[in-house]
Image (cartoon, grey):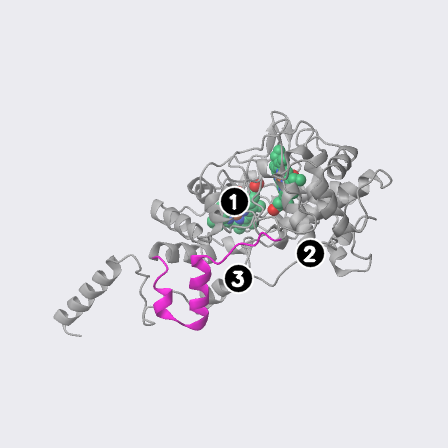
């Protein structure tokens, strides 16, 4: 090529790349990703995934139970001193998390409250996977002395004493929550209604999802709308960073547990056993999918994961690989909120101390030695995993039906 012409082409490329939507150029007409990278990117979709139900919960997907569950989710009278509701630690405006490093109920908990968006698509619930369904996960905070500190009897009496709740309860479960019914059975049903509500929290599409689908269609124009920094961050995520080996699939999580070399002390001299303790708690729980309260028959395929889970030495200090959808809204990070920002998380992976990783499993993690620009690119990419409408979620208006008790109606 003529020297002058080459300079003109180069100048044109520089001009193009000054814009916000410039991707890394390559010989392939501007396609910034190799065939292998494209395949890995496509594996993070499509979104939303097929609809899922809360396992072992016959009320999941039923409108009446969802209405009841939503009311109970925001109900402080489910706690012993009328202060705490599920929503205290899972606030809608904070992506159903609480913005604290460790949650505060009646006492300070050892862990960070996860977001409840898309929890129905999680394989295990809790950082240690101590629950195998949304309804069983909902029982612990109601009873736990550091959380809502209620009892099954108190929960039954409360629901029985509220006309509208009692009516919706009866319509969902066939029988009223009267004193003849076992308190524990009412507690479980309350948890199933709450689980049915939480199962409705599935987030919308994100800028990443639009980019991913544009890539699937080969629509370069639509792809170009995805910011260049996010494209570079994505390339690191599925490439040199190998983040996608654990944060895989549409949820950006493989649904399993890992050790990322973080400190897991709860207090001096006391560690959080993580997944190891979670498996023990799951197996001992009367509320797991194999127990008598589960609506899934013993032969149901949803019970398989619970039936076969076995604690192994490597599970000690492992925590759930969290989904990265809307992660930009849920600082601080990690199971105990020990990292304040996404930049701190990326820096952690960049500077990793391999001696801190005790699990004897596969060695996926290596210090990445990312420079400042690369770290910013990864953070920019993580920022595109948030649906724009996520924070405008509002509770559904209560239906006016045979159960509705009109608060304004004068007493008869
Ligand atoms: C005092 C704060 C607090 C209250 C109240 C609370 N939670 Fe949580 N929630 C947490 C914390 C902390 C975790 C992480 C627990 C763990 O890893 O063991 C959690 C975990 C969860 C999870 C698992 C999510 C996941 O992705 O792993 C679900 C579901 C959940 N809570 C639902 C509820 C419901 C429903 C209620 C009300 C019945 C409730 N929570 C009340 C703090 C709270
Ligand atoms: C070996 C599996 C593995 C790999 C590889 C991995 N992660 Fe993680 N990631 C985890 C686990 C496990 C946690 C939770 C650790 C904890 O809380 O103790 C986590 C937590 C996170 C969090 C915090 C999310 C939250 O809600 O608190 C972010 C952000 C994150 N990882 C991003 C990345 C990025 C970016 C990469 C690539 C540079 C990466 N991860 C590579 C397993 C992995």
The quadrant holding residue 343 is: top left
> Relative to 300, is 360 on the left or the right?
left
Decide: few, some or many residues near mark 2? Use Cα within 10 Å; few <14, some 14-19, many ≥20.
few
Whichever of labels 3 and 2 marks the residue nearer the N terminus, that label is 3
Residue identified by numbered label 3: 47
Q: Secondary structure at mark 3?
A: loop
Contact between labelled residues 2 and 1, with CB atoms less than 8 Å apart: no
Taking the view exactly as shown, the residue that stands out farthest to the right is: 180
Is residue 367 at least partly visible in the picture?
no
Of the two numbered discs 3 and 2 in the rendering, the one whose residue sits closer to the viewer? 2
Decide: few, some or many residues near mark 1? Use Cα within 10 Å; few <14, some 14-19, many ≥20.
many
Above or below, comparing residue 159 to residue 306 in the picture: above
For the record, the magenta segment spans 200-227
Of the two numbered discs 1 and 3 in the rendering, the one whose residue sits closer to the viewer? 1
Between the residue at mark 3 and the residue at mark 2, the CA separation in whole angstroms equals: 23 Å
Is residue 207 at least partly visible in the picture?
yes
Taking the view exactly as shown, the residue that stands out farthest to the bottom is: 1
Q: Secondary structure at mark 1?
A: loop
Instruction: Give the label on residue 62, or none.
Output: 2
Residue 254's spot in the image, x, y percent? 59, 55
């Amino acid at each position: 090529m003529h020297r002058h012409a080459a300079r003109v082409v180069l100048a044109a490329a520089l001009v193009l790349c000054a814009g916000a939507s410039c991707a890394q150029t390559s010989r392939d007409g501007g396609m910034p990703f190799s065939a292998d990278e494209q395949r890995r990117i496509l594996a993070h979709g499509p979104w939303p995934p097929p609809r899922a139900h809360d396992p072992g919960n016959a009320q999941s997907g039923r409108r009446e139970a969802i209405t009841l569950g939503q009311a109970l989710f925001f109900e402080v009278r489910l706690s012993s001193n009328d202060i705490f509701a599920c929503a205290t630690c899972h606030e809608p405006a904070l992506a159903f998390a609480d913005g604290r490093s460790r949650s505060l109920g009646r006492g300070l908990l050892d862990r960070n409250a996860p977001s409840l968006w898309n929890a129905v698509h999680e394989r295990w619930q809790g950082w240690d996977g101590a629950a195998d369904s949304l309804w069983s996960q909902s029982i612990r905070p109601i009873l736990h002395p550091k959380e809502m500190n209620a009892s099954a009897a108190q929960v039954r009496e409360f629901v029985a004493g509220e006309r509208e709740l009692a009516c919706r309860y009866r319509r969902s479960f066939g029988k009223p929550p009267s004193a003849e019914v076992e308190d524990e059975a009412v507690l479980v049903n309350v948890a199933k209604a709450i689980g049915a509500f939480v199962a409705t929290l599935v987030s919308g599409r994100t800028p990443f999802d639009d980019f991913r689908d544009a890539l699937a269609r080969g629509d370069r124009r639509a792809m170009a709308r995805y910011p260049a920094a996010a494209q570079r961050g994505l390339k690191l995520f599925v490439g040199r960073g190998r983040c996608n080996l654990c944060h895989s699939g549409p949820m950006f999580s493989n649904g399993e547990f890992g050790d990322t070399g973080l400190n897991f002390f709860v207090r001096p001299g006391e560690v959080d056993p993580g997944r190891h303790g979670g498996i023990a708690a799951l197996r001992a729980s009367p509320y797991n999918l194999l127990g008598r309260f589960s609506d899934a028959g013993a032969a149901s395929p949803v019970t398989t994961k619970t039936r076969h889970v076995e604690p192994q030495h490597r599970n000690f200090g492992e925590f759930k690989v969290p989904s990265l959808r809307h992660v930009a809204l849920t600082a601080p990070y990690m199971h105990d909120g020990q990292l304040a920002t996404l930049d701190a998380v990326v820096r952690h992976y960049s500077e990793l101390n391999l001696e801190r990783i005790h699990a004897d499993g596969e060695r996926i993690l290596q210090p990445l030695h990312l420079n400042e620009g690369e770290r910013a690119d990864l953070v920019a990419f993580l920022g595109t995993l948030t649906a724009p409408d996520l924070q405008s979620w509002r509770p559904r208006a209560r239906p006016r039906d045979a159960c509705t008790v009109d608060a304004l109606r004068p007493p008869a």
